[in-house]
Image (cartoon, rainbow, N blue to C red):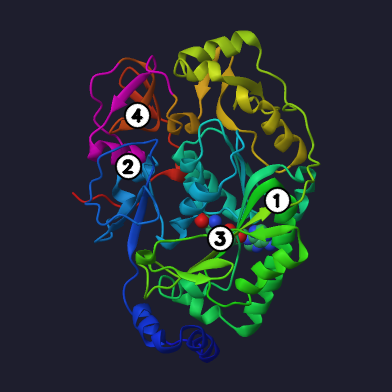
Amino acid sequence: MNLPEKFSANLKNILGDTYGEFEKALGTDSPVSVRLNPAKPFKPSFPLGDAVPWASQGFYLENRPVFTLDPAFHAGAYYVQEASSMVIEHILKNHAPATRPLKVLDLCAAPGGKTTHLASLLSEDDLLVANEVIKSRVGILKENLLKWGFPNVIIVNQDPETFADLEGFFDIVLTDAPCSGEGMFRKTPEAVNEWSEENVLMCAARQKRILSAAAMLVAPGGLLIYSTCTYNATENQENAQWLTRTLDFEPVEIHTPEEWGVTNAHPGLQFFPHKTRGEGFYVAAFRNKSRDERYVKGKPNIPRLPRKQAELLSRWIRPGVYESFEYFLKNDGGIVAIKQSLLNETGSVLRALQKRSSGLEIGHFKGNDFIPSHALALSGIVSGSVQHVDLPERDALLYLKKEPFALPEHSNGWTLITYQNLGLGWAKIIGDRVNNYLPTEWRIRMKLEE
Ligand code: SAM
């Protein structure tokens, strides 16, 4: 790999004698790893290799399967994620505040690797807000989050500086900042061409702006996590130190077992590809020492769904889960399900932010008929009283391609199409006709092997 001279000089400075091993590691293939969705158990069609030491559901794969041709991938049974960045689990497990429900913000969220991970670490009564400022990246974030199926998530498309009405609201704020991407040189070699000293400085300045906005949003005693996929101290340690110098935050000491091979880069951790099986990654965590909490309060400012219609939904949503939600009606007729136990917290977020989703959108009514949404199909909360049809792999792929597939025994009506009992999407069956409700933009375009 042809590395920029100044980058190499800096890394030689950081690594000393071990620089040669680092450069050699950049010449090897990137490890492939996945993180399983604990809410969607399944039997993988590929062998799982070694466990990722710092992530309970993380596994390395010896070979890279064609993920697009695995229905379980489309059902959200796992996420393909580089291993080093799964270390946020270790930080949450050891340092998350004891507050319940936890209110968690992922401020730089797309495409959703860490958001889906956070979702798996939260309980079903916690609230997760996923923000992505770049509009064109919100679609993939939404797709990955719908597939993951965590119900209490609000997706936002705003600049971090516009969150001020939520000052002191979140117990955990993750700022996985846009960076110079040095740690991605092996996985995406194009990143090498974009590297320059000027870009490092530009990224460091932008990160300071994002961190200032992020810090305001952390509750007293709450946790701010800062991460990048780069190595240089200008973006990493210097920004982390700047944060504790200028704001009322103290660094959290993150201990890791020696055998993990993680390097201490005070006040954070650094992953190097010659020492851990993964890409370059930096992470640090800070606790808020201030007492300020000045966020907007109130219940969701959208009308409730009329009682009669809400009652009709009981056929669609699992008993027990159905009663745990309140149902609201958006202007466009979409129905949103919000956990009863999170009405105040969700209300604060909906009141404070403008460009955001409103919660779990489960469908809409057309007259007395309920039209279920794709999010509901993927949510894992569909009642057993709705017809489920489980397909073998090839038919599941045909469904995902929106092509004709063989239907096992069935009745007419709305049908949840599943693979290994995991929801893939809806079909409406009327006699010989099967209307496939998979969103067209989500369909698999890849050709299937004969
Ligand atoms: N957390 C994501 C994951 O694990 O999949 C990766 C996030 S990526 C490192 C950084 C994100 O920050 C990108 O999605 C980028 O669009 C977004 N971003 C770019 N400029 C930003 C800004 N000024 N404020 C906040 N986010 C920004």
Range of magenta residues = 382-410
| Quarter residue 71 falls in | top left
Amino acid type at image mark 3: Glu
Sequence-wise first label, 1 or 2 = 2
Residue 113 appears in the picture as rendered:
no
- Helix, strand or loop at label 2? It is helix
Residue 49 appears in the picture as rendered:
yes
In the picture of the structure, the residue carrying the numbered disc 3 is 253
Q: CA distance from mark 3 to mark 2?
A: 38 Å
Sequence-wise first label, 4 or 2 = 2
Q: How many marks?
A: 4
Sequence-wise first label, 3 or 1 = 1
Q: Residues within 10 Å of mark 4 (few under 14, many from 20)?
A: many
| Residue in the image at 76% along x and 55% along y | 161
Against 168, is 364 above or below?
above
Q: CA distance from mark 3 to mark 4?
A: 47 Å
Against 400, is 228 above or below?
below
Residue placed furthest toward the left: 450
Amino acid type at image mark 2: Ala
| Residue in the image at 38% along x and 66% along y | 258
Sequence-wise first label, 3 or 4 = 3
Amino acid type at image mark 4: Ile
In the picture of the structure, the residue carrying the numbered disc 2 is 72
Q: CA distance from mark 1 to mark 2?
A: 32 Å
Q: Nearer the viewer, mark 4 or mark 2?
A: 2
* Residue 409 place in picture, x, y as percent: 23, 19
Residue 197 is left or right of residue 381, and the answer is right
* Residue 431 place in picture, x, y as percent: 32, 17
Amino acid type at image mark 1: Gln
In the picture of the structure, the residue carrying the numbered disc 4 is 417
Report the image quarter containing ligand 1. bottom right
